[in-house]
Image (cartoon, rainbow, N blue to C red):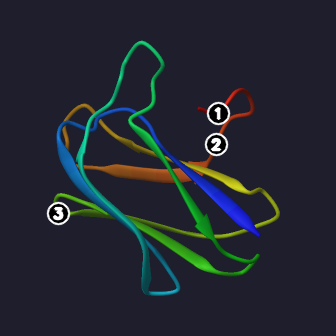
Amino acid sequence: MELAVELGEGFADDEVTVLVDGQEEWHRTGVTTNYSVGIADVARISGEPGALVEVRVRDLAGRREVGEDARLRADIDVSGKKLALGAASQGDIF
């Protein structure tokens, strides 16, 4: 199944890696949040329910097991010291 990992707020010219069960599935540099839409990028990856998705950026990492929802969202807090990875809110995806 295809998963969408929305990279949301707090990204600033970052190098981001998304792994599924420890294997790199997506990697990009220069990831920066466009605050007019609240999204930096969308990583489209493959993963089944029960797989562990990990987002790595800077010295931060967030992990979440894939449930039935095919959309996750990663945000970096304003201090730049915490990455939250959770279910994405419903609505348009870019």
| Location of residue 17 (image quadrant) | bottom left
Residue designated by label 3: 59
Secondary structure of residue under mark 2? loop
Residue designated by label 2: 88
N-terminal label among 3 and 2 = 3
Q: Give coordinates of residue 24: x percent, y percent.
A: 40, 79
> Is 3 above or below relative to 24?
above
- Please state, as top left, top right, bottom left or bottom right, where the C terminus lies in the image: top right
> Is 62 above or below relative to 23?
above
N-terminal label among 3 and 1 = 3
Q: Which mark is residue 93?
A: 1
Between 4 and 55, the one lying in front of the other is 4
Kind of residue at disc 3: Asp
- Which of pointers 3 and 1 indicates the residue nearer the eye? 1
- Are discs 3 and 1 less than 8 Å apart at CB? no
Residue ID at (31%, 37%): 77
Kind of residue at disc 1: Ile
Q: Give coordinates of residue 41: x percent, y percent.
A: 43, 41
- Are discs 1 and 2 less than 8 Å apart at CB? yes
